Image (cartoon, rainbow, N blue to C red):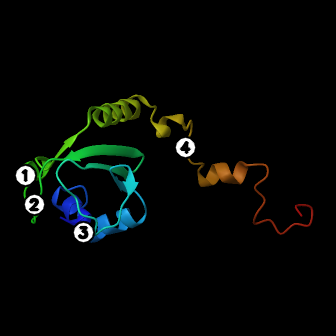
Amino acid sequence: MRLDKWLWAARFYKTRSLATDEIGKGRVNVNSQSAKPAREVRVGDRVELRQGPLVRCVVVVGLTESRGPAPVAQALYVETEESIAAREEAARRHRESPEPALAIDQGRPTKRDRRQLSDWNRWSASIEGN
């Protein structure tokens, strides 16, 4: 079975063309080797795919020609223990990281605040301001 078809059927990507694009960008490896979309995938192959900052490693345990429901798709692969641990660690770090919006003390300045800024002399036509 073709790699792009398997990734689509296993629901890693929404469309086959997205799977093909990701393979072309070098974000998918099969058995630690770069792959092409038409590469044959067999049961027992180890597929590494990068989704955002996360690298997932799965072992192929089933093949299918059609895209089925999610439980059927999840039965096509087994994720490795290292990959599960890395994914859980990334989720934990994301949960524990501070919210970026909380670092803003006052937020965006209002129109009145901008007028009162000392270096804000944008609309002045005076000679002294230049």
Residue 69, x across and y down, in percent: 7, 56
CA–CA distance between discs 3 and 4?
43 Å
Residue highlighted by disc 1: 72
Give the numbered dot on residue 107: 4
Judged by depth in the image, the label closer to the viewer, 2 or 3, is: 2
- Viewer-nearest residue: 15 or 45: 45
First in sequence: mark 2 or mark 3? 3
Marks 4/1 in contact by CB < 8 Å: the verdict is no
Marks 1/3 in contact by CB < 8 Å: the verdict is no
Judged by depth in the image, the label closer to the viewer, 4 or 2, is: 2
Judged by depth in the image, the label closer to the viewer, 1 or 2, is: 2
Residue highlighted by disc 2: 64
Give the numbered dot on residue 125: none
Q: Amino acid at mark 1?
A: Val
Marks 1/2 in contact by CB < 8 Å: the verdict is yes
Quadrant containing the C terminus is bottom right
Residue 129, x across and y down, in percent: 88, 61
Q: Label 4 crowding class (10 Å Cα cut-off): few <14, some 14-19, many 20+?
A: few
CA–CA distance between discs 1 and 2?
9 Å
Quadrant containing the N terminus is bottom left
Residue 20, x across and y down, in percent: 32, 68
- Viewer-nearest residue: 95 or 10: 10
